[in-house]
Image (cartoon, grey):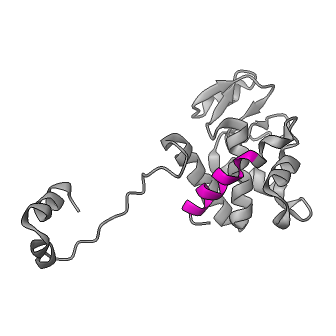
Amino acid sequence: MKFSSFLSYLALGVSAATAAPAVQIDIDRRANLPGLNAVQTKYANAIIAKAKAEGVGAHGCQAAIATAMVESSIIMYANNGVPESLKYPHDRVGSDHDRIGLFQQPASIYKNIKCDMDAACSAGQFYTEMKKISGWKNMAIGTLAQKVQRSAYPDRYAKQVGLATNVCKAGGL
């Protein structure tokens, strides 16, 4: 529905709106996910779509969103120490060893730099590692994220579970 049509309906009253032909109103899909800005929402939507494609459900989605929030604030990082990463779209340049992307995946382990720098592909890498963990489907989100990432700061993931739950739910999981 055009904004001008909407204003006309307001000015003419409800009877004009009901007499007019049915118009399907599109939901604004550009709206940000809860607690995220537009850039973060773009990446989170890719993580959610990959969760759906991989069949990891809300639990897997929440682990990935919580992890990406802790590791990068859901912002795409290239790294000067990994010059190839600078060739791909990114929002910031980091310098944490050889870690790149939303999940700060080490390029020495995740050697496909193009994939590391792509939200959906890197989420797929996260989900692949996650599925290797025995009992992942019933594990606390923070514990699961830590088992995948092996972080020096394991307590940070659990602090993002509320946000991750809201984001995944808004994304249809």
Magenta-highlighted residues? 159-171
Residue located at (71% from left, 68% from top): 55
Residue 160: say if magenta. Answer: yes
Residue 124: image x %, image y %? 72, 54
- Image quarter in which the C terminus is found: bottom right
Q: Looking at this view, is 119 or 173 the one in front?
A: 173
In this view of the protein, can residue 54 be seen by the observer?
Answer: no
Q: Looking at this view, is 3 or 140 the one in front?
A: 140
Outermost residue to the left: 12
Residue 116: image x %, image y %? 71, 41
Reply above or below: 131 against 37: below
Residue 133: say if magenta. Answer: no
Q: Quadrant for residue 134, please give it.
A: bottom right
In this view of the protein, can residue 38 be seen by the observer?
Answer: yes
Reply above or below: 170 against 105: below
Residue 71: image x %, image y %? 73, 38
Residue 15: image x %, image y %? 10, 76
Q: Quadrant for residue 72, please give it.
A: top right
Mark count: 0
Residue located at (64% from left, 38% from top): 73
Residue located at (82% from left, 56% from top): 130
Q: Is residue 10 left or right of residue 1?
A: left
- Image quarter in which the N terminus is found: bottom left
Reply above or below: 166 against 103: below
Please, what is the dominant secondary structure of the magenta stretch?
Answer: helix
Residue located at (65% from left, 32% from top): 77
Q: Looking at this view, is 51 or 111 the one in front?
A: 51
Reply above or below: 74 against 48: above
